[in-house]
Amino acid sequence: MAGYGLLSPALLIMVAMLALPIAALVLLSFWRQSGYTLDTTLTGANYARIFGLSDSPTVWMGIPFYLAYPVPVILLIKSLMMSLTATVTVIPLAYPMAYFIAFRVRSGKSIWILLLTIPFWTSYLLRVFAWKIMLGYTGAINSGLMALGIIHHPLDALLYNSGAVTVVLAHSWVSFAVLPIYVSLEKIDRSLLEAASDLGDTRWQRFRRITLPLSMPGVIAAALMVFIPTVGDYVTPTLIGGSGGSMVGNLIQDLFMKRNNAPMGAAVAIVMMAVIALIALLFVWLTGYHKMRARRR
Amino acid sequence: MKKLKFIDRMAQGKVSRRQMLQSAGAFGVGALMLPKLADAAGVLTCLEWGGYDDPKYYESYLKRYGQKPNFSIFAGEEDALAKVLAGFKADVMHPCNYSVSRFVNAGLAVPIDTSRLSNWKDLFPSLQTAQGVVIKDQIMMAPADWGNAAIAYRPDLIDDKFKADPSWSIFYDEAYKNKVSMVDDPVAITIGAMVGGMSYDEAYLLNGDALKKATDNWGKRAVDVSRILWADPTDAEQAMAAGEIVAAYSWNGLVKDLHDQGIKVAYAHPKEGYFTWFCGLTLLDSGKADPAQAYDFIDAWLSPDTGKALIAQGYGHSNIKSFSVANPADVAAMGITDPVKMMEQSIVFKSTPDDVQVAQNKAWGDVKALKL
């Protein structure tokens, strides 16, 4: 009971700010919009609409979708692919940074960690706008390349597509990925590394057989920390993506606002949440996260 | 227990949207749907287009009350409508002749008592009785500003073919891919259908299979060809200033702004026709401020001083006196200063029935979402 007493402030906040809103969203997703009002009879029509089948496929990127209303599913798949790409980019960028701080920095580690947080001293919006200046038509990259004589016309392809969104997502989330990897590297017992060297491992073998496996929990945590929030991102695709780079978050916003169909928006949001939860669970299970944790004890 | 009763009624569908939102709001749950809570009673809240919150458009109001109203900026009337439907409280809204009926049909607008507006008697009589101003024998919108929608282009960058024969078709032509910017609005489908030979009177009512066909063809092309679909005119303005795009769907103000920056820009009237809109102020039923304040705000918008500022931006105004106090050079630059003449020469935007508007919003949203 004492444990629950300690937990209660956090628990209260979680219930009020997380569980209740999600419950409201679930309820909303079983209602329907009829004209200007909500029809509050419970119905699964919104979900049926998302997954309703059709005989004539909509072809998107060469893949036929046999769905009557394929937009949410296609956008969800597109968002998942974009987040996955960002995650796969982030981990190799973050790992060396974390490795450097954990093993190479001898004094003043806290200063290095403080340096990592500098991007968060400015608003996320400003960082995204900064990328607009980098990638823009008259931006830094285009004018740099023109000045060097490599190109003669500014490149169109830098901005307003899913590639640009993925780059910005990867950049914005690198710092988040460094910390969990750093923590798991820091916790590695240094005597294990000495033992490996004493028994004849080369530096590469030592990394592959000791350091990497023992830091995997941090890598997995970092991957989830980047993957989960980026799927539903809304700001980045709005500013950087143009119409070609829109993600499922943009559809949800559009449904709630312009299309005035909040129940459908809620249903798409719930489907997105469920799919992300499933993928995260699958990922944790496939990588044997529990076994890894057990080994470390 | 009250709580159980509520759940009971909810399950039976006896709870209205407003009650539900109120209850949800009590738990903080409604925060999702209430983007910004209206400030304490007393201060006027106005739903406004980007750029129209400039104090030069309501000087007399500012003088009298000493502070600006609270503005909530929207990118299109449908956004504003969704916001009010979700519980946002506002006193005044700035719709246009073709969109005001959406607010009236939704039961959100209140008729205007013109005897409380000192400037009403000076308005163009044709606007006082225009469709959209008067709905079911009641004044639902006080007309204020009017202007056009046509094509702004960079004469120094665009090809001669367009200059010789301006046409809306450039927004649907692969040859102009990434060089133009259409507005982020279902009107892109309507105009596409007009390029395809349909009349406006037929195209603005597109629905059902015909809408699907037009969207798959013209809507998709508009999305593919445009560098950006602008929601805020400054987006198009910046892209045009940089030379990133050479032409854009635009209102009069953009041309004036770019011209003032010393950028070569012209305003083409395409062969399929150009559009006229007129907008104004509508009273909403959810406001918390004293209605007298709302009337003073609307009256400020109808004043010749506001007209002068609008004319300087290249727009028209509803007050006849505005044209005598405005800078003569600005009046001359407008060309046509009589709204009736303007409406005869161009296509006046019409209001689409609710079900058609909803279908068009959906079609446009979906075709945008599927762009690679």
Image: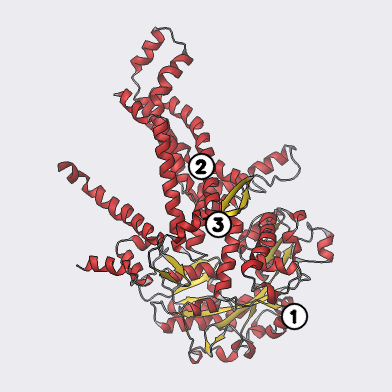
Q: Do labels 1 and 2 share a chain?
A: no
A55, B123: nearer the viewer: A55
What coloring was used for the rendering? secondary structure
Residue at (64, 46) in percent of width and height = A139
The circle on residue B14 is: none
Query: For mark 2, what is the residue?
Result: A83
* Amino acid carrying mark 1 in the image: Gln
**Residue A200 in the figure: left or right of residue B132:** left
Q: Are marks 3 and 1 on the same chain?
A: no
Residues at marks 1 and 2, CA–CA distance in whole angstroms: 51 Å
Q: Are marks 1 and 2 in contact (CB under 8 Å)?
A: no
Residues at marks 3 and 1, CA–CA distance in whole angstroms: 41 Å
Percent coordinates x, y for residue B26 in the rendering: 30, 65
Q: In this view, does B193 lie above or below A205?
A: below
Query: For mark 1, what is the residue?
Result: B345
Say which element carries label 2: helix
Residues at marks 2 and 3, CA–CA distance in whole angstroms: 23 Å
Chain letter for mark 3, please.
A
Q: Are marks 2 and 3 in contact (CB under 8 Å)?
A: no
Percent coordinates x, y for residue B215 in the rendering: 65, 62
Q: Which of marks 3 and 1 is in front?
A: 3
Percent coordinates x, y for residue B256 in the rendering: 68, 68
Q: In which quadrant of the rendered view does residue A282 lie?
A: top left
Query: For mark 3, what is the residue?
Result: A69
Visible residue check, residue B257 = no
Q: Are marks 3 and 1 in contact (CB under 8 Å)?
A: no
B249, B57: nearer the viewer: B249
Residue at (35, 22) in percent of width and height = A188
